[in-house]
Image (spheres, rainbow, N blue to C red):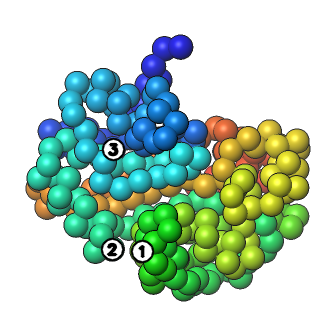
């Protein structure tokens, strides 16, 4: 099977941003899969790449990577301090309020202690007993959005860990939605090299946008 090609959202001498597809891991885990974002992008641009944050394998959207250690440190400091603004799109079970803030501690790492975590939620549209929401995490914890939405009784559609199988099956059968309904839509960071704001936007991929349109839900554009 030929190597996948990653869509570059930004590329300069010190950093790159890609539109990560759902189903691709950022780096090799226990499964030792052949293609990951790190090795595919390395081969694609001919540079060593440094991960500075993560997206779950099943989540699509904006992923930023550094091309040198100094840039990696500068970006990691921004992510750790909460200076990076991230905006996600999520399809959830139930109808949440138009706006709400979920303040609930979650682990920073697997089996780690719970630490403060806050996510802002804004409802964008509804379909039957379901809703499309925008999620803005103020902190960056392990599976934060997925855990927070479950905690608020609005689990993500397509989430095999925190969601419900019966709802996931319904959306597979009715709308051909075979993935986690979570997309990293937008990310804003300060470029460590020049100090300028850098806004990155990843269009909603067709494997999620198509089902959303079929439900009559809005598909955000840049």
Mark closest to the chain's N terminus, 1 or 2: 2
Mark closest to the chain's N terminus, 3 or 1: 3
Figure check: 177 above or below 158:
above
Q: CA distance from mark 3 to mark 1?
A: 20 Å
Q: Which mark, by number, is residue 82? A: 2
- Residue located 22% across and 24% down the image: 46
Seen from the viewer's position, the closer of residues 49 and 132 is 49
Helix, strand or loop for disc 1: loop
Helix, strand or loop for disc 2: loop
Seen from the viewer's position, the closer of residues 135 and 140 is 140
Q: CA distance from mark 1 to mark 2?
A: 6 Å
Tell me the mark number nearer the camera, choosing from 3 and 1.
Answer: 1
Mark closest to the chain's N terminus, 2 or 3: 3
**Label pair 2/3, CB-CB below 8 angstroms:** no
Instruction: Name the side, left or right, on which 108 lies relative to 217.
Output: left
**Circle 1 Cα neighbour tier, 10 Å, few/some/many (<14 / 14–19 / ≥20):** many
Q: Which mark, by number, is residue 17? A: 3
- Residue located 49% across and 31% down the image: 33
**Label pair 1/2, CB-CB below 8 angstroms:** yes
Figure check: 50 above or below 38:
below
Tell me the mark number nearer the camera, choosing from 2 and 3.
Answer: 2
Seen from the viewer's position, the closer of residues 40 and 129 is 40
**Circle 2 Cα neighbour tier, 10 Å, few/some/many (<14 / 14–19 / ≥20):** some
Figure check: 209 above or below 198:
above
- Residue located 38% across and 67% down the image: 85
């Amino acid at each position: 099977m030929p190597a996948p090609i990653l869509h570059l959202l930004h590329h300069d001498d010190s950093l790159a941003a890609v539109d990560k597809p759902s189903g691709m891991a950022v780096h090799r885990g226990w499964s030792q899969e052949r293609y990951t974002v790190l090795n595919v992008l390395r081969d694609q641009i001919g540079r060593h790449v440094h991960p500075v944050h993560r997206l779950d394998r099943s989540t699509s959207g904006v992923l930023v990577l550094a091309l040198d250690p100094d840039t990696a440190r500068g970006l990691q400091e921004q992510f750790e301090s909460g200076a990076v603004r991230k905006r996600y799109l999520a399809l959830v079970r139930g109808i949440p309020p138009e706006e709400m803030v979920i303040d609930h501690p979650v682990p920073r790492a697997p089996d780690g202690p719970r630490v403060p975590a806050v996510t802002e939620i804004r409802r964008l549209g509804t379909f039957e007993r379901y809703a499309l929401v925008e999620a803005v995490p103020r902190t960056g914890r392990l599976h934060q959005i997925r855990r927070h939405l479950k905690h608020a009784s609005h689990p993500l559609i397509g989430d095999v860990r925190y969601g419900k199988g019966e709802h996931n099956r319904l959306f597979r059968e009715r709308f051909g939605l075979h993935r986690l309904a979570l997309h990293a839509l937008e990310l804003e960071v300060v470029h460590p090299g020049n100090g300028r704001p850098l806004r990155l936007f990843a269009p909603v991929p067709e494997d999620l946008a198509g089902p959303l349109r079929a439900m009559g839900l809005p598909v955000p554009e840049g």
